[in-house]
Amino acid sequence: MQRQDDVKTENKLKFHVFQDERFVDLNLYQYGWERTAPLHSYGPHKRGHYLFHYVITGSGTLYANETSYRITAGHGFLIVPGQTTTYVADAADPWEYTWIELDGLRVNESLSLAGISGDQPLYTPQNREAGLRLQEQMLYIVNHPQDSPVRQIGQAFLFLDQLVQSSAAPRRQSPRRLRDFYMKEALSFIEQNFQRDVSIEEIAAFCGLNRSYFSKLFRDTMGESPQAFLLHYRMARAAQMLKETALPIGTISSMVSYANQLHFSRAFKSVYGVAPRTYRQTHFIRKDG
């Protein structure tokens, strides 16, 4: 999918939206490349997912955390969910950059290992060659929107790996075997029970933990609260059914634990920005034959 103005500015902008909601460990949302005009700006805006830019040429400024960050070619910057930011191209030497917006269970951990976060948004590669390999990996994704969803997700994992391997400020991974066990138990329980009205206390009890400790462990590992994750998981399943089936919206609502269709519509809109009916009209996949 491309913006309507892509045809007019094809040499300056490539923009694609990933259309599959089934991936949990890592999911793409949109990705692209742009050669901006002088002083071109975006924001102030708040993102719902992680957004990483890598600057190919030129320079600009990121405004986040009540701080301005000067970013030049060969470097990158991260925007995290819920963070309000603005970024502006330089007046004399505007930037050309590529970007990827993504989220999922493994994304927060990988970004942390790369040494970047909402508080530390700047990425610096170990050397020029390492940065160029990251650039190539990102541009491969941008230039192959026709690849299958599985292949695109695989390339996104390679991007994350290169981000970690190339960073000049990587963080060591701490031992977390027991934490991994608890999270796998929790995710398995959610996957098998999202259709009914499960509580966070019930998930915590299944893992053998009290709610307070479980919630902290979950947030530290996944980057969001168990409530937020459960909401996003249910809405992703609902979005997939809206795209791939002709089931009534009321049926889909009940299949993701919402007995009240109005409550479901509000929850869906809070995640996707549009009502379920509108989403289906835009994304429904018609099957021939």
Image (tube, grey):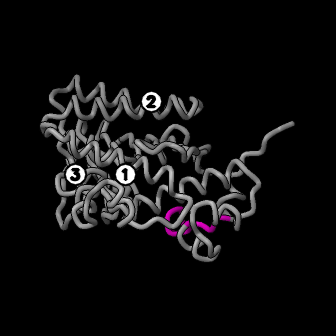
Sequence-first disc among 1 and 2:
2
Identify residue for label 3. Answer: 117
- Foreground of the two, 117 or 212: 212
Asked if the residue under mark 1 is in contact with the one under mark 3, i.e. CB atoms within 8 Å, the reply is: no
- Foreground of the two, 287 or 120: 287
Write the start and end of the magenta stretch as one range: 268-276
Where is 63 relative to 109, above or below? below
Residue 141 horizontal/vertical position (percent): 46, 32
Closer to viewer: mark 2 or mark 3: 2
Where is 32 relative to 44, above or below? above
Q: Name the residue rendered at 20%, 64% in the picture.
A: 65
Q: CA distance from mark 1 to mark 2?
A: 24 Å
Identify residue for label 2. Answer: 154
Q: CA distance from mark 3 to mark 1?
A: 25 Å
Sequence-first disc among 2 and 3:
3
Disc on res. 186 = 1
